Amino acid sequence: MSVLRTEKIVKQYPGCLALNNVTVSFESGKVNALLGKNGSGKTTLVKCFSGAIQPTSGSFYLDDEKLHFHSTAEANARGFATVYQEMSLIPSLSVAENIFLGRMPKKGKIIDWKKANEEAEALLNKMGVKINPKEIVSRLSMWQCQVIEITKAMSYNPKVLMLDEPTSSLASNEVESLFNVIRELKKQDIIILYISHKLHEVPQITDTITVLRDGYCVGKVNTKDVNHADILKMMFGETKQRNRPDDVEAQDETVMEIKNLTRKNKFSNINFKLHKGEILGIAGMLGAGRTELLKSIFGADPYDSGEIHVGGQKAPRRASPISMKKLGLGLTPENRKEEGLILIHSILDNLCYASMNRTSNGWLENRQKRKSAANKQVQELDIKITDMASPANSLSGGNQQKVVVGNWLNTQPEIMLYDEPTRGIDVNAKQQIFEIMWEQSKRGISIIFVSSELEELLEVCHRILIMKEGRLIGEVRPEDVDTNQLYALSMGDEIA
């Protein structure tokens, strides 16, 4: 039996202690679950193992050999393989080409296709699946693509295999097929780390559970010795719920109504109303369809059927972000670095892009208007900057997020859509984002707030809608549930 263990691993970021003296161990021949809410440190730990980052202090060992990787290539060479949630396959290539990408077997200078296909088939057979190595990946199902990702990792003969949310994009009928593959891997004496938010899957596939919370290791247990409630308590602890200020109240007036909104394979028959000054949360696990819903409401992505009414006016069937902005909507996207900011452009420009019609006169810019609009947001949002001309990538994550928010506030919106606005920012910056939302609510701005951090929704919102697999399955008020109950509801479970 092989063992991967750590001794007092610490990872310090500016303003954030991601891992705090973490001592854990994982054995071969088992599926070892690594659990924790967002921000718990599990991804950071995996990145230390994979060579993507280096710990600030502490050590980790494989069979008592002390290891320290300076790159992912070095980690791969020493037998550490990671299968990430976002697939990296090239759809237009064959299965064999994807498995051996960049290292295809050759005869002299020519690719040996026969050997490549035979070796790919042998690896797939070892995984217990029948997939034609010549098949083009774009023709495969999602679970087959996930198997190809794992097979690609296994082609390096790893000693440690880390699976990050391997079922996040799979339908329920595909999950069991993937589990059968993972059970075959257990027999090959490799150390398997299994990261998932889907707690109902954990008893089906794992042997041990290690839980991280706020950078600490809470403990390790055998899966058979604990139940769902025990795991939730390890993940969240005895949570004390904070509440929004009493003067942050929603009004009765309906400012937006969604009727039977549907987008194939993303979400179906979505119906809800949003009230003036209301902060409406949407809870759900990864893949629930929350981000896709916000993008369709904002016109960034199409929808197949249904209606969006804003202020009593029906939105155009083929809406765009420009037309929805004219109706008073703004969106802070989940991926601020790629969709919310132009990082190499100045802070001033990033604060004004969404409001260019207000801050410029045609092609000739009115620089004074732009400066005034940008300065207003810097002051009101308390954005920490030294020079408005500095690029946005010079700011901390929290201040970058405030720039994204300020950019849209300069459009004077009536409805703001926030998609994971606190992702990757520290606790103090998160609280500032909440205070911005509450202040907007007081001014009569209505908000839809998507977050994977259930405690945030309970703290900030007036109401919370629950999505699962593209459907709204419930609605709660924060005063009626706690974090554990909301998590259970998001999984589709009943609560006492």
Image (cartoon, helix red, strand yellow):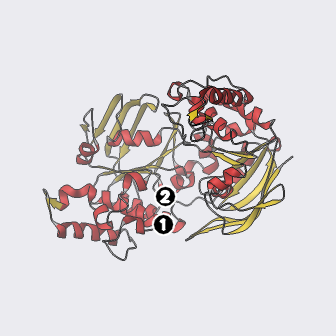
The amino acid pointed to by label 1 is Ala
Residue 388 image position (x, y, % from top left): 31, 72
Q: Are marks 1 and 2 in contact (CB under 8 Å)?
A: yes
Q: Gap between marks 1 and 2, in whole Å? A: 8 Å
Task: Tell whether 135 sits left or right of 151.
Answer: left
Disc number placed over residue 326 in the picture, else none: none
The quarter of the displayed image where residue 14 is located: bottom right
How many numbered markers are drawn?
2
Q: Using residue 356 as the reference point, say whether residue 168 is left or right of it.
A: right
Give the residue drawn at x 75%, y 65%: 59
Q: Is residue 289 above or below residue 264?
A: below
Q: Report which quarter residue 206 is drawn in.
A: top right
Question: Dot 2, crowdedness within 10 Å: few (<14), some or many (≥20)?
Answer: many
Residue at the outermost front position? 108
Q: Residue furthest bottom?
A: 386
Relative placement, left or right, of 269 versus 126 is left
- Which quadrant of the rendered structure holds the C terminus? top right
Q: Amino acid at mark 2?
A: Thr
Q: Position of residue 148 (x, y in %)?
A: 62, 33
**Mark 1: few, some, or many residues within 10 Å (few <14, many ≥20)?**
some
Q: Residue at x 48, y 31 (%)?
A: 92
Q: Can residue 21 be seen?
A: yes
- Is disc 2 placed on a helix, strand or loop? loop
Q: State the residue at coordinates (87%, 46%).
A: 1
Disc 2 designates what residue?
422
User: Which of the two labelled residues, at mark 1 and mark 2, occupies the earlier sequence position?
Assistant: 2
> In the image shown, does 358 or 27 lie closer to the viewer?
27
* Residue at numbered disc 1: 429
- Which of 121 and 251 lies nearest the eye of the viewer? 121
Query: What is the secondary structure assignment of the residue under circle 1?
Result: helix
Residue 414 vs 169, above or below: the answer is below
Image quarter of residue 262: top left
